[in-house]
Amino acid sequence: MKSSELLEVAERVLADAKPGEEMEVVASWSLDTEVRAYGGEVEHLVSADSAGVGVRILVDGRQGTAWVGGLEEASLRACVADARDNTRFASPDPFAGLAVPDGHPIEGLELFDDRLLAESTESKIALALDLERRIMESDPRIVGIESADYADSISAGAIVSTTGIRAFSSETSTYLGAYVLAGDDAETTSGFGFSVGRRGEDLSAETAATDAVEKAIAALGATKVPSQRLTVVFDPYVTSQFISLVAEMLAGDAVIRGRSPFADRLGDQVSSSLLTLFDDAINPLSPTSSEIDGEGLACRRVPLIDAGVLAGFMHNSYSARSAGAVSTGSAQRSSLQSPPSVGPFVITATPGERTHGDIVAAVGEGVLVRELSGLHSGVNTISGDLSVGIEGLMIRGGEPAESVAEVTVASTIQRMLNDIVMIGSDVTYFPWEATGVTMAIGDMALSGK
């Protein structure tokens, strides 16, 4: 289904708005394919499309929402009636309201690759099977595969409102990923590898297989090391998780609720001057980039930390009104069932000039972290306290050395930001809302034996 067709559906629904109502209509459609290979055969194959509409109505500060999983006319009318009825049960909120056009132009990003439409199911199956084959033929220490998956999505959406929003977009995305198991007589370890793109031909089974196998094998023989303070080097995968945590603290809804340690620090030095952090939603190289946000406003580059100085927060229209600010085009919709929240599309740290190898060599003695565990239970995003398990490699004499596991690192997010000593040039894109680079953080506490 084309975005223009969804726009027509959304505008028909919007025509049912009554005087005195603000109404927002979101229409979406997607065609998703999933393939899982196992034992040289297809274990799982699903290709299905879905469509739906979400309606939000506001009357005198009271908000009602409803949604429907289909585009039938009777269902759409019932959805509007349900949203209207739900406003009666809501409490008035002085900041409730819809987004209004802000004049920011929508970027003409090339997020839709129509060549994916011509790719056959057989070619998608072949990618998953090739991924599995490469893994199993790679090393005798590989003892199994938890998953070898291909997935793609073709999606379109439209947003219209009585406040003048009229926006639509479409995009394609593809993914190839594997979790593998390596083992010997004493232990079993795991590793993850992936490849992302806009069409199947963008994907590399070799890259996904090599990364997964290398990480699993490198973790064999891991031991505890003595407790100490040392420099910690995050590989891009780990850095993407770290800056996602920072972004969570810089979301406007967290700020207005007093759930961010950065709430009153705008204009303050909050990190090493090496760090410039921003949400780069309009970067077409990322699989999570977007032209419009969840309220139909144009996505844009949102500065957050500029050379260590807190430059701003991400806002949707609600958090912006609450904070006396303006929306940054950072409204996120997890589904049609709920109002938009606040969050990044492509959280990014400006890369430095050193390669991954240069940073490891410059650190000399430290630990290279390749995996975190207990990330959500071990981080308090209100206070910034962090204590998480790690897996990786010790750095000895400027080179990766023995594997290390069953140890933890502890600090606070605030201190870690200030203790950044090097940022790499190796920008890496992931199938989630954060990029990664190699990042070295000095003087962290490692708890081992």
Image (cartoon, rainbow, N blue to C red):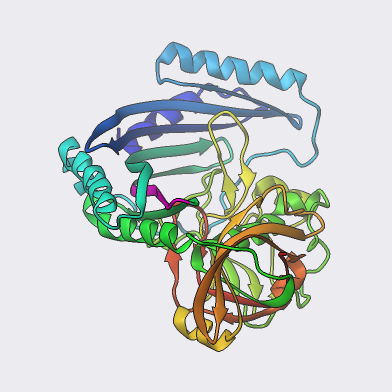
Image quadrant in which you'd find residue 43: top left
Q: As displayed, is residue 29 above or below residue 139?
A: above
Closer to us: 383 or 156: 383
For the point 51% across and 86% down, the residue is 361
Where residue 204 sits in the image (x, y, percent)?
A: 26, 57
Q: Residue at x 61, y 16 (%)?
A: 82
Q: Which quarter of the rendering shows the N terminus?
A: top left
Q: Is residue 290 visible?
A: no
User: Going by the picture, which residue comes out furthest to the front?
Assistant: 185
Above or below — where is 12 with respect to 256?
Answer: above
Indicate the quadrant where residue 94 lies. Answer: top right
Q: Is residue 177 magenta?
A: yes
Q: Is residue 250 magenta?
A: no
Q: Which residues make up the magenta segment?
A: 173-185
Q: How many marks?
A: 0
Give the side of residue 395 with respect to residue 32, left or right: right
Above or below: residue 294 compared with residue 86: below
Q: Position of residue 222 (x, y in %)?
A: 54, 62
**Residue at 51% in and 76% down:** 401
Q: 341 left or right of 144?
A: right
The location of residue 151, given as percent across then percent down, is 33, 41
Task: Give the prevailing secondary structure in the magenta stretch.
Answer: strand
Residue 264 image position (x, y, % from top left): 83, 64
Image point (82%, 58%), residue name:
383
Q: In the image, is residue 165 above or below residue 378?
A: above
Tell me the quadrant of the picture where the C terminus can be found: bottom right
Residue 52 picture quarter: top left
* 167 or 361, nearer to the observer: 361
Q: Nearer the viewer, residue 156 or 9?
A: 156
